[in-house]
Image: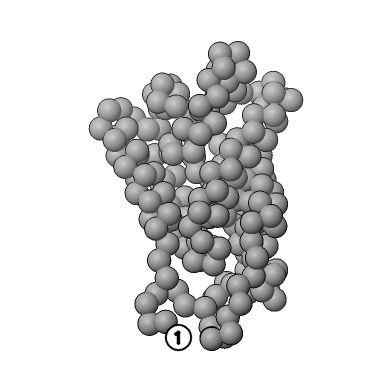
Amino acid sequence: MNSKKMKAPCTILLLAANVAVFFLLSFQGATEDGLFMLEHGAMYVPFITEQGEYYRMFTSMFLHFGFEHLFNNMITLVLIGWNLEVEIGSIRFLVIYILSGLGGNILSSWWDIRLADYAIAAGASGAIFGIIGALLYVAIRNRGRIGDISGRGIVFMIFITLYYGYSSGGVDNMAHIGGLTTGFLLCILLYWKRKREDSPFIQY
């Protein structure tokens, strides 16, 4: 058994990037101000469809409305992301994170257009839900568990989070659903179960 714990560099890098962006913007203005966030890369569908500012699909993934929004997302990123990255590798993890964030923003944009109801949006939750979706698939492939996390626990967490989103205001549920679905589907394509002939345990 390897005495060195496996690392998760991309999880730490993403955590650092989100925190750095938040504090950088905090020194310039109020991160809870929608117009200020819009000036610095937040999502707003009319700006994307009418002005071609597609970069907002990406930049909005690293912006957060206030410290509580950042804190909640980063705690989930570390707890869930660390487990997934150790299991599937850093490159696959990063691909799933970025594409899930984009997938969540695309579905959110489509929904806004369908309802003709536009709002300024930002946050890493679409990408984080992609990690949750990917982790669910890995748990299914590994007889319902990945380390100390069970598939049932992941499903329960998904249910509670989505319920909270639908029962509260200001939560982009379409981004969550889009990220979750994208992450699950990407993991089907990118993940294959490791052979652990030397040890029946997963180290973290």
Would you identify the image quadrant in which residue 9 lies? bottom left
Query: Residue 190: horizontal and vertical position, in percent?
Result: 64, 56
Question: As drawn, which residue projects farthest toward the left?
Answer: 27
Q: Residue at x 69, y 49 (%)?
A: 181
Would you identify the image quadrant in which residue 34 lies? top left
Question: As drawn, which residue projects farthest toward the right?
Answer: 114
Q: Residue at x 48, y 28 (%)?
A: 42
| Figure check: 194 above or below 187 | below
Q: Secondary structure at mark 1?
A: loop
Residue to which mark 1 is pinned: 1
- Residue 94 placement, left or right of 176: left
Query: Residue 166: horizontal and vertical position, in percent?
Result: 66, 44
Q: Residue at x 74, y 25 (%)?
A: 114
In this orientation, does residue 167 appear? no
Query: Residue 197: horizontal and vertical position, in percent?
Result: 58, 85
Would you identify the image quadrant in which residue 134 lies? bottom right
Specify the quadrant that holds the C terminus: bottom left
Q: Amino acid at mark 1?
A: Met
- Counting every numbered tag in the picture gives 1
The way the protein has been coloured in the rendering is one colour
